[in-house]
Image (cartoon, rainbow, N blue to C red):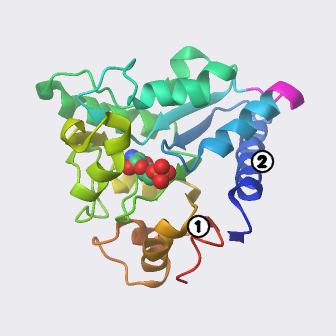
């Protein structure tokens, strides 16, 4: 779906998410959301906060699992995705504190494999993700599933591509200081979500949006796997659509 700008698009996606939350609440069930960081989903979160404040949208039945976190990373660090999510959404709505989850960037290396397995097991116990929100990296990554990631890849520690490190350099105060690794939900869990929405705004995303949507399905562009998902949608602005 191509929107004139990211404002209208973000409002539409926030309304879709709110619809899932309300429907699940009526059914007395949790709404299990896969959430993303980065600049792309910021306006979606802002609209959800507005709906909470002005329309009484409650997050009491919401359970969230974020895609990724740098490793190692302390939750209160400026670059932390825990901090990002608290600032952009969690601290402004009534989501119970035990209901939101991110990969733990503080764990020692030897505990990571077990953590990643348990992260997926928790999602499975909820019956999978009802909705997965995604951005797309300039190299076509989803979460931190860099090019080369397989469709059945699991939640794991990834080494970040140079492109990804360059894009994060601003947040870290220079390329040399960027985390070289991150924990990411694998492609498999993303593909198992009942609904997937990928957001992309701006000219710099256009080439990989085109490769993901119109190119062949390939590990070179992990977002291209979404062509194989039966309920996935790219929600983009006219600039991001310019190479289609
Ligand atoms: C990071 C995140 C991704 C995100 C990407 C794009 O790499 N791990 O999940 O999609 O950035 O970020 P932005 O939305 O700021 O362009």
Q: Which residues are magenta?
A: 53-58
Question: Within the magenta stretch, is there residue 162?
Answer: no
> x and y percent of residue 161 in the render?
23, 56
Q: Residue furthest left?
A: 110
- Residue at the spot 40% in from the left edge and 17% down from the top edge: 76
Q: Earlier in the sequence, mark 2 or mark 1?
A: 2
- Residue at the spot 29% in from the left edge and 52% down from the top edge: 166
* Whether residue 54 can be seen here: yes
Up-down relation of residue 41 to residue 217 (above or below):
above
The quarter of the picture where the N terminus appears is bottom right
Q: Nearer the viewer, residue 196 or 139?
A: 139
Count the marks: 2
Up-down relation of residue 77 to residue 239 (above or below):
above
> x and y percent of residue 35 in the render?
52, 41
- Residue at the spot 21% in from the left edge and 47% down from the top edge: 158
Residue position marked by numbered label 2 in the rendering: 15
Q: Nearer the viewer, residue 210 or 155?
A: 210
Question: Within the magenta stretch, is there residue 54?
Answer: yes
Quadrant of res 234: bottom right
> x and y percent of residue 16 in the render?
74, 51
Instruction: Give the Cα separation between the discs numbered 2 and 1.
Output: 16 Å
* Local SS, label 1: strand
Residue position marked by numbered label 1 in the rendering: 234
- Residue at the spot 13% in from the left edge and 28% down from the top edge: 109
> x and y percent of residue 7 in the render?
74, 53
Quadrant of res 218: bottom left
The quarter of the picture where the C terminus appears is bottom right
Up-down relation of residue 147 to residue 30 (above or below):
below
């Amino acid at each position: 779906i191509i929107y004139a700008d990211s404002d209208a698009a973000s409002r539409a996606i926030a309304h879709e998410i709110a619809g899932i939350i309300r429907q699940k609440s009526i059914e007395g069930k949790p709404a299990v959301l896969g959430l993303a960081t980065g600049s792309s989903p910021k306006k979606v979160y802002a609209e959800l906060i507005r709906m909470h404040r002005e329309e009484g949208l409650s997050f009491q039945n919401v359970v969230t699992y974020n895609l990724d976190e740098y490793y190692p990373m302390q939750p209160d660090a400026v670059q932390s995705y825990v901090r990002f999510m608290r600032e952009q959404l969690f601290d402004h709505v009534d989501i119970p504190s035990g209901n939101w989850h991110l990969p733990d960037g503080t764990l020692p290396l030897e505990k990571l494999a077990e953590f990643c397995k348990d992260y997926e097991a928790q999602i499975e116990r909820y019956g999978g993700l009802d909705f997965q929100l995604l951005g797309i990296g300039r190299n076509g990554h989803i979460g931190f599933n860099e090019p080369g990631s397989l469709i059945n890849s699991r939640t794991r520690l990834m080494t970040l591509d140079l492109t990804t490190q360059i894009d994060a350099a601003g947040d870290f105060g220079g390329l040399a200081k960027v985390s070289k690794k991150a924990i990411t939900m694998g492609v498999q869990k993303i593909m198992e979500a009942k609904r997937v929405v990928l957001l992309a705004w701006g000219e710099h995303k256009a080439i990989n949006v085109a490769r993901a949507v119109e190119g062949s399905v390939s590990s070179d562009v992990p977002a291209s796997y979404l062509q194989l998902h039966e309920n996935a949608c790219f929600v983009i602005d006219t600039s991001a659509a310019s190479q289609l």
